[in-house]
């Protein structure tokens, strides 16, 4: 198994459980839609359950921003990873990631939010306004929302603020007229922030984020993890509710053909190959 990933100081490493006698130590990378501390709190119980069920010891990993996470995916730096639909469509081909699971019964939608007390009622009202997005390559929050604005010939100034939570806070504080997110992060944002905002637009729906394994991980462990994810979903709803989902189901690569069917050129997605750090792949 490849060595442990070292990322920038903003990244978080969490060994779960600390005293486990594991067969293997593996990394699990989470796309940084929210703060590192919040993601660790959300995903820690599920990763602990995976450790108990598979015998492998899972190390939580995230990065300071989404472009850096994308560079790590490009390098194949995570053994397992939770990534957005466009990430999977690209890095299943470029970096050898294979889908294991995705959220059950949900489709991913981008949302556009504004302050609750604003006069904006539709995205066509956002002409020449500053709009916050988490990163150029965030699928629902950025790619789909930007495409919706472009289709309606709405000119805007894009500002990228690193995470979904940062988008919502920027809009709530008046630093941006509107911001792009997705329904899952909108539902889990701090209520004190959400109460200051409202949704004015939702995009079309697509297959949600993938939990995927890198091709360098053995098939036996990959299958154990896939089974553990679905079993944990059935046995302990709190585990998946904690990551903002109602359930997990096994996935096939073809589940993301709807994303591939968008026909977006690689350079048009905004997904980075170069981040703020170089992630080791060995």
Image (spheres, rainbow, N blue to C red):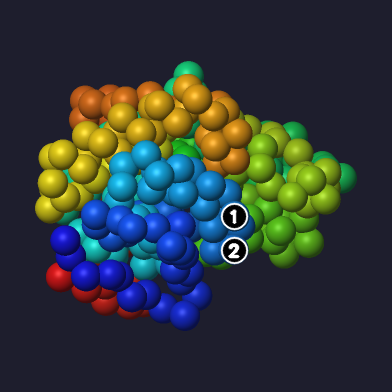
Q: Nearer the viewer, residue 169 or 26?
A: 26
Circles 1, 2 touching at the beta carbon (< 8 Å):
yes
Q: Are there few (<14), some (14-19), or many (20+) residues within 10 Å of tag 1?
A: few
Residue 172 relative to residue 1: left or right: right
Give the quarter of the figure containing the C terminus: bottom left
The answer, for residue 188, to whether it is visible in the render is yes
Q: Which residue is mark 2?
A: 37
Question: For the residue labelled by badge 1, is the local secondary structure a helix, a strand or a loop?
Answer: helix
The answer, for residue 123, to whether it is visible in the render is no
Residue 129 relative to residue 66: left or right: right
Q: Quadrant of residue 252?
A: top left
Q: Quadrant of residue 281?
A: bottom left
Q: Are there few (<14), some (14-19), or many (20+) residues within 10 Å of tag 2?
A: few
Q: Which residue is mark 1?
A: 41
Disc 1 to disc 2, C-alpha distance? 6 Å
Residue 2 relative to residue 117: left or right: left
Task: Residue 278 in the image: state x and y as whole percent.
Answer: 27, 76
């Amino acid at each position: 198994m490849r060595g442990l990933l070292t990322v920038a100081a903003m990244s978080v490493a969490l060994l779960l459980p600390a005293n486990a006698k594991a067969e293997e130590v593996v990394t699990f990378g989470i796309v940084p839609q929210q703060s590192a501390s919040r993601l660790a709190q959300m995903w820690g119980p599920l990763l602990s359950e995976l450790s108990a069920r598979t015998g492998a010891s899972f190390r939580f990993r995230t990065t300071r921003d989404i472009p850096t996470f994308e560079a790590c995916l490009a390098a194949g730096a995570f053994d397992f990873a939770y990534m957005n639909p466009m990430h999977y469509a690209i890095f299943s081909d470029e970096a050898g990631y294979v889908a294991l699971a995705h959220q059950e019964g949900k489709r991913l939608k981008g949302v556009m939010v504004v302050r609750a007390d604003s006069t904006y009622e539709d995205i066509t009202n956002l002409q020449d306004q500053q709009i916050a997005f988490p990163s150029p390559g965030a699928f629902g929050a950025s790619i789909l929302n930007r495409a919706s604005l472009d289709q309606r010939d709405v000119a805007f100034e894009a500002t990228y603020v690193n995470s979904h939570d940062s988008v919502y806070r920027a809009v709530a504080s008046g630093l941006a007229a509107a911001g792009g997110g997705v329904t899952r992060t909108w539902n889990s944002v701090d209520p004190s922030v959400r109460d200051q905002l409202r949704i004015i637009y939702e995009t079309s729906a697509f297959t949600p984020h993938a939990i995927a394994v890198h091709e360098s991980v053995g098939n036996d462990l990959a299958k154990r993890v896939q089974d553990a994810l679905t079993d944990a979903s059935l046995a302990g709803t709190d585990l998946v509710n904690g990551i903002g989902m109602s359930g997990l189901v096994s996935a096939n690569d073809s589940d993301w053909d709807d994303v591939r069917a968008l026909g977006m050129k690689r350079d048009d997605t905004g997904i980075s190959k170069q981040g703020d750090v170089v992630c080791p792949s060995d």
